Image (cartoon, helix red, strand yellow):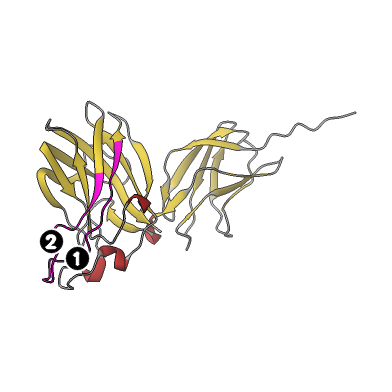
Amino acid sequence: MSFRVLAYPTVSAASDYNFKEGTQITLTGTNLSDVVSVTLTGTTDQATILSAEKNTLVITMPASNIARATLDIVNATGKMTTSQEFVNIPKSFIAFDDDWGQAAAYGGTVQSWSWGCSAYGYDGMIQSGTKSLRVDYQDGGLSLFLGCNWSTPNLAFTDFFAPKYLSFWARGEGSDVNITIVPDSPWPGNDMWGGPAATGSKTITINKDVWTYYKIPTNFISGGYSRLDFKIEGSTDKTVYYDNILLVK
């Protein structure tokens, strides 16, 4: 009697979880040497396989109309769907990739309304692309990474784009850093600065000296908002690098 050994592909990690057409991603796992196809789940959008080895699979991502998707990977044994989900950058709202996003609410641009910190594009520490967003926090400062055109009174950014996730890469310089993300609508009232006042907060730890991917459900926020604060805890001066800050449907 002969027995067939089942060796489905597995994926434990990826070099990136964001993509656009042409993005090269390395998948790490097992049973990858005989992979014959990689497709975005629920679509016919197929990645190009550049190389396939036992524990690594290098692919080029396709163009797609889907906002985010897992991957269906097929080898000689059969199909496996990844637990990892991949975010389509062109179908997301870009707060920062290599620069501030250019298509904010009501025709405006994304802005940095920063107090107690300096936030700027930086080419000396990059996760992908040509620049990251370097934020030098001083004395417990905060940085507001979203803005919009304020000529339309009393409307929130979320009236324009309602995200399910906030995703980004980040790394702390020299030590772990606790960052609290809160919605910011500080000027209630009926003038052009007014708007819905959202509530909620989410504290995360940014790991030191290594890029880490964060994908956070936005349901910790209640109400509409037009800006997000990335606030540092404590008064010690810290530097944090962010890359590919996206709001994802």
Counting labels gives 2
Q: How far is mark 1 from mark 2, CA to CA? A: 7 Å
Residues at marks 1 and 2 touching, judged by CB atoms closer than 8 Å: yes
Relative image position of residue 54 (x, y in whole percent): 60, 31
Up-down relation of residue 160 to residue 126 (above or below):
below
- Residue at image point 50% right, 43% down: 84
- Element at label 1: loop
Q: Which residue is mark 1?
A: 195
Q: Which residue is mark 2?
A: 187
Relative image position of residue 28 (x, y in whole percent): 51, 34
- Residue 104 quadrant: bottom left
- Residue 176 quadrant: top left
Up-down relation of residue 14 to residue 94 (above or below):
above
Relative image position of residue 230 (x, y in whole percent): 22, 45
Which residues are the magenta region?
181-204
The mark found on residue 126 in the picture is: none
Quarter of the image where the N terminus is located? top right
- Residue type, numbered disc 1: Gly
- Element at label 2: loop
Q: Main secondary structure of the magenta part?
A: loop
Q: Residue furthest right?
A: 1
Dot 2 crowding, Cα within 10 Å, few <14, some 14–19, many 20+: some
- Residue type, numbered disc 2: Trp
Dot 1 crowding, Cα within 10 Å, few <14, some 14–19, many 20+: many
- Residue at image point 54% right, 51% down: 47
Mark 1 / mark 2, whichever is N-terminal:
2
Q: Say which of 36 and 30 sits in front.
A: 30
Q: Is 182 contained in the magenta span? A: yes
Residue 107 in the figure: left or right of residue 48: left
Q: Residue furthest bottom?
A: 152
